[in-house]
Image: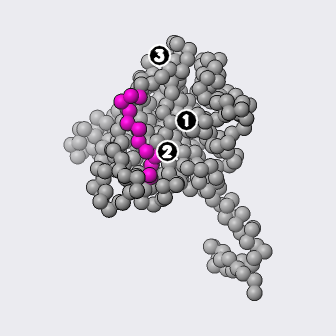
Amino acid sequence: MENTVLDAKTNVGIKNGSKVDYLLSELKNFQDIARHIKPLSGEIPQINGIDIYGEVIPFNGIVGGDHIIYVDFNKRYDLDHRIQEAQKQNRQDIVEKLELNKRRAGVLVADAAGHNITDALLSAMLHQAFLTGVQYELKDNGEVTADLFEILNTRFFNSSSITKFITLIYGEIWDNGHFRFVNAGHPPPVVFSNKYDKLIKVCYEQVIHFPPIGTMPSREDVDSRRHFSHLGYKKKYSVHSINLMGEGDILLLYTDGLSEHCDEKNCLYFAERLEDTLKRIKNESASDIYAQIKENLLSFAEPSDDITFVVIKKV
């Protein structure tokens, strides 16, 4: 008797010879779903004095573990209506923070462990959980706080193994060039100074290095006694800041696909060659800077991982 698999839609048995077609169809369906969470060009935030552009370059050319979420508070949310609701509740603290959201926008860059097509599942989980969390943050706090990432970390810790984790950085850029961020095991941002014509070191001595999302629970979690952890417990996420001081300064958010990109001789593209490229193109728009860095790094070497980077330029 021929073995069969069960068609999820029709509950009809599929014969052995059709298994490959069935699995290919399911994979295509997964890819289509994953593609729909990729940010569209219209989702890129529009902030006075700030130019932003970034994309994911999937290792397999389709989808992978890297992901970007743009949060343009002005376009995504009815801030004026939310302010009116907060005023009715006499929550002036929330009103003031909601007003500040008109001057800033958020960017989340994440890297789920692995670069297979199915690793996009973790990114899809993060995408929906994060944006759902932002809704509650705006209602309860008027802004996105580090507490959201505590909740995400606990949720992923309880639903995935330590071999499947997510590094991420979430930051908010202000119209004056102020950038505040939370980093969970992710490569730190870098700044190219227009004035000094080079990448400059950002002081991280006081920055606590947190583990990736999902690897260990917080010791301050109210339910921590219910979460056994082989790796121990982490400190609560904290928020850090960078200031783009001058016109033309460029902030880069990226995944390790960029920082570890190398040729057959193990020569790294990051950071010397990246700096040379930025020197040549620093006066271009964010989208042109992205495009020319992408062209340059792909001509330097074939990728061995997903590569993601976001250009944030003060104009």
Mark 3, residue position: 246
**Left or right position of 52 against 180:** right
Q: Residue at x 48, y 55 (%)?
A: 162
Mark 1, residue position: 254
Amino acid type at mark 3: Gly
Residue 211 visible in the snapshot: yes
C-beta proximity under 8 Å, tags 3 and 1: no
Amino acid type at mark 2: Thr
How many discs mark residues in the rendered view? 3
Q: Secondary structure at mark 1?
A: strand
Which residue is at the front of the view, 230 or 187?
A: 230
Between the residue at mark 3 and the residue at mark 2, the CA separation in whole angstroms equals 30 Å
Please provide the residue range marked out in magenta: 204-215
C-beta proximity under 8 Å, tags 3 and 2: no
Say which of marks 3 and 2 sits in front. 2
Image quadrant containing the N terminus: bottom right
Q: Considering only vertical position in the picture, is 173 above or below 80?
A: above
Q: Which mark is residue 167?
A: 2
In magenta segment, residue 209: yes
Q: Earlier in the sequence, mark 3 or mark 1?
A: 3
Between the residue at mark 1 and the residue at mark 2, the CA separation in whole angstroms equals 11 Å
